Image: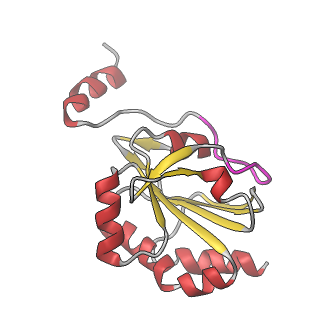
């Protein structure tokens, strides 16, 4: 048995998937992926439709309610007025389930949608690496459905400042 197969067999009973995105990250000018996910309220979100006009930030984080992910989300929450003033729609994405996303949103009063990506379809569509049920922290900014900026080593507490800086360019 190959090592990856062995790890997958061990992790499966715990609900963990051992896999990695094989696609490269989106390139500048790429279209917002036409992928569907469920938000923290269990509502289906067609990402390309929801973010096809104006500015759209899609940021990925490893796990809801963990220290770095909380800093990242709260950075965006604390600058949400400045982001919405610039007409930015924000989607946070992790491989958590709907209940975890809802609890995270409520606990920290996050004013934007959190997408549950248990099957990694959203991460794969964006080319975001993932393994053991955790997506890598990355951020993608779109203007009218086209990628204009990506941060493949996204910050935690500086996420909003980084995005606002890009909007000024």
Is the residue 35 above or below the residue 169 in the image? above
Q: Main secondary structure of the magenta part?
A: loop
- Whether residue 127 sits left or right of residue 96 in the image: it is right
Colouring scheme, one of rainbow, by chain, secondary structure, one colour: secondary structure
Residue for point 52% across, 37% down: 21
Residue 60: image location, x then y, percent: 49, 57
Total numbered circles: 0
**In the picture, which quadrant includes the C terminus?**
bottom right
Q: Nearer the viewer, residue 11 or 4?
A: 11
Residue for point 29% across, 74% down: 107
Q: Is residue 79 magenta?
A: no
Q: Which residues are magenta?
A: 23-32
**In the picture, which quadrant includes the N terminus?**
top left
Residue for point 66% across, 46% down: 33
Residue 6: image location, x then y, percent: 28, 22
Is the residue 146 above or below the residue 3 in the image? below
Is residue 36 in view?
A: yes
Give the quarter of the image for residue 73: bottom left
Q: Is residue 29 magenta?
A: yes
Residue 85: image location, x then y, percent: 66, 85
Q: Nearer the viewer, residue 103 or 66?
A: 103
- Whether residue 136 sits left or right of residue 58 in the image: it is left
Q: Nearer the viewer, residue 132 or 106?
A: 106
Residue for point 50% across, 77% down: 76
């Amino acid at each position: 048995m190959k090592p990856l197969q062995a790890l997958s067999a061990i992790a499966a009973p715990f609900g963990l998937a051992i896999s990695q995105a094989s696609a490269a990250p989106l390139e500048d000018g790429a279209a917002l992926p036409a992928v569907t996910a469920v938000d923290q309220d269990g509502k289906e979100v067609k990402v390309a439709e929801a973010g096809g006009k104006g500015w759209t930030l899609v940021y990925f984080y490893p796990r809801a309610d963990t220290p770095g992910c909380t800093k990242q989300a709260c950075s965006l929450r604390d600058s949400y007025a400045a982001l919405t003033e610039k007409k930015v729609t924000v989607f946070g994405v992790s491989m958590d389930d709907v209940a975890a996303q809802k609890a995270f949103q409520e606990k920290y009063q996050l004013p934007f949608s959190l997408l549950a990506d248990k099957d990694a379809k959203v991460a794969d569509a964006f080319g975001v690496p993932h393994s053991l049920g955790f997506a890598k922290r990355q951020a993608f900014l779109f203007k009218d459905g086209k990628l204009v900026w990506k941060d493949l080593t996204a910050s935690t507490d500086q996420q909003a400042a980084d995005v606002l800086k890009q909007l000024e360019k």
